[in-house]
Image: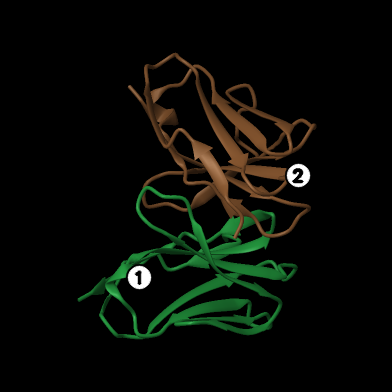
Amino acid sequence: QKEVEQDPGPLSVPEGAIVSLNCTYSNSAFQYFMWYRQYSRKGPELLMYTYSSGNKEDGRFTAQVDKSSKYISLFIRDSQPSDSATYLCAMGRGKLIFGQGTELSVKP
Amino acid sequence: GAVVSQHPSWVICKSGTSVKIECRSLDFQATTMFWYRQFPKQSLMLMATSNEGSKATYEQGVEKDKFLINHASLTLSTLTVTSAHPEDSSFYICSASEQGTEAFFGQGTRLTVV
């Protein structure tokens, strides 16, 4: 079993839709949870950074962590074509364990 | 967020030659730097962790003699792919962290070995 599981997609949605991206993990010791956005042939860009359980909101993005279920989510409201990218969940501090990444396409 | 600069952004080299990739933290002191490799449609796989002034710690299955890592200063780490072969072609990404806080990534280097 991989430490972090993420549905690779691809996921295609119309512009304006709400997008839900998810990861599950097996190591209960993880305390720091991140979501990165990666455009093709570019390095990952940090979107959201959450410590322990709970919700965090930043503009159109909301990150949720449920440590009891070992499940994290990223919601994107009012999705835009510019949100089309690969979204990677990651866990750890400094040394990160990544999910496989979900390829998202937002159609105009 | 902090800025991490990686150079070059892409490189093509002949099989058997060596290639050096630089990773610089521009506005903070990177006590720890990480090197990842990413194949198409796959996630980032950690290759090694380097602390300034110390030998790098390599992940299982990564050849330390092939992927030489140097972290001689708090703002610069280098990855040298020695005697590169076509199977080493990949996207290499570094990240840098100050005192174990969140890590920031470079833009990545696309290596093609022909």
Identify the residue at horizontal 63%, vertical 21% (top origin): B65
Which disc, if any, is residue B31? 2
**Quadrant position of the N terminus of chain A in the picture:** bottom right
Q: CA distance from mark 2 to mark 1?
A: 32 Å
Residue B21: mark:
none
Query: Given the image, what chain letter belongs to the residue carrying mark 1?
Result: A
Quarter placement of the C terminus of chain A: bottom left
Residue tagged 1: A83
Q: Chain of mark 2?
A: B
Residue B111 at least partly seen: no
Instruction: Tell me: residue B70, above or below residue B37.
Output: above
Percent coordinates x, y for residue A93 in the rendering: 71, 59
Chain rendered green: A
Three-letter amino acid code at the position of disc 1: Asp
Residue that appears at 60% across and 35% down? B61
Mark 2 closeness class: few <14, some 14–19, many ≥20 residues within 10 Å? many
Q: Which amino acid type is marked by label 2?
A: Thr
Residue at horizontal 29 percent and vertical 85 percent from the top: A16
Q: What residue is drawn where x is 76% and y is 55%?
A: B100
